[in-house]
């Protein structure tokens, strides 16, 4: 909590969200801004992101549970006894535990707001909408644990080995690979032929064209 604001850290992050339905692009921008402001409020200024400040927040309790108690999930968040409880699979690997905690934190931030914020997502399909929300939580976790300015600075300062970057930011190698690709810092296909970037992409479905319609064109 900041000295000049009596609102909790989580409430301050929640206040960033506009009071309207978002496009998917807006939702991604909001997630990144929330991650940036959370780092600021927790006074985290360089990698790796320490969870000490977050674990000390009075309105959130974080516990690690053995896999058999996690109902086949790696993370669970729910409201209990006036505060938030986040459970994380203790048997998961270190980098993924950290990522899961950040992912679940986004669910906490969105609680009570998601119906309004994400009303237009999913093209009217609740399953697609749910998947898009999960992807937004993953994106928030990436922005929180691997802020684009920090990753870019490390890359420009000569840290180009993915394993070294993953170690610096305390994330999994696969998470760092995805982040580098997203930020355009890492070419995963250096030998790919130029023409393949402009070739026809096979459609996921086969469409038939009415001959009468063709005759009218």
Image: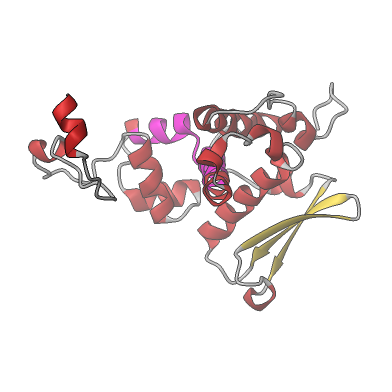
Left or right: 29 in relation to 4: left
Depth check: give the residue in front, 118 or 163.
118
Give percent across and percent down for residue 26.
54, 27
- Vertical position of residue 152 compared to residue 75: above or below: above
Q: Identify the residue shown where x is 35% and y is 35%.
A: 155
User: Residue lying farthest bottom?
Assistant: 68
State whether residue 86 appears in this view: yes
Give percent across and percent down for residue 11.
79, 33
Residue 87 lies in what quarter of the image?
bottom right
Q: Identify the residue shown where x is 59% and y is 72%.
A: 91
Left or right: 88 in relation to 182: right
Task: Say whether residue 6 is magenta.
Answer: no
- Image quarter where the C terminus lies is top left
Depth check: give the residue in front, 137 or 23.
23
Give percent across and percent down for residue 39.
63, 34
The boundaries of the magenta stretch are 135-155
Left or right: 111 in relation to 91: right
Residue 64 lies in what quarter of the image?
bottom right
- Image quarter where the N terminus lies is top right
Q: Identify the residue shown where x is 54% and y is 46%.
A: 125
User: Residue lying farthest top?
Assistant: 4
Task: Say whether residue 149 is magenta.
Answer: yes
């Amino acid at each position: 909590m900041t000295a000049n604001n009596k609102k909790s850290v989580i409430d301050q992050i929640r206040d960033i969200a506009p009071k309207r339905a978002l496009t998917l692009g807006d939702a991604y921008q909001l997630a990144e801004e929330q991650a940036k402001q959370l780092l600021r409020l927790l006074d985290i200024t360089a990698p790796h992101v320490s969870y000490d400040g977050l674990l000390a927040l009075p309105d959130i309790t974080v516990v690690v549970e053995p896999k058999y108690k996690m109902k086949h999930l790696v993370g669970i968040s729910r409201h209990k006894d006036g505060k938030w409880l986040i459970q994380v699979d203790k048997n998961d690997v270190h980098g993924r535990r950290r990522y899961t905690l950040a992912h679940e934190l986004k669910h906490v931030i969105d609680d009570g707001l998601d119906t309004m914020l994400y009303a237009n997502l999913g093209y009217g399909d609740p399953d697609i909408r749910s998947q898009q929300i999960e992807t937004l939580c993953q994106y928030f976790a990436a922005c929180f644990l691997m802020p684009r300015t920090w990753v870019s600075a490390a890359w420009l300062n000569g840290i180009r080995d993915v394993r070294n970057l993953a170690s610096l930011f305390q994330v999994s190698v696969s998470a760092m690979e995805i982040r580098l690709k997203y930020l355009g810092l890492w070419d995963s296909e250096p030998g790919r032929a130029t023409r393949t970037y402009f070739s026809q992409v096979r459609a996921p479905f086969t469409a038939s064209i009415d001959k009468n319609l063709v005759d009218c064109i």
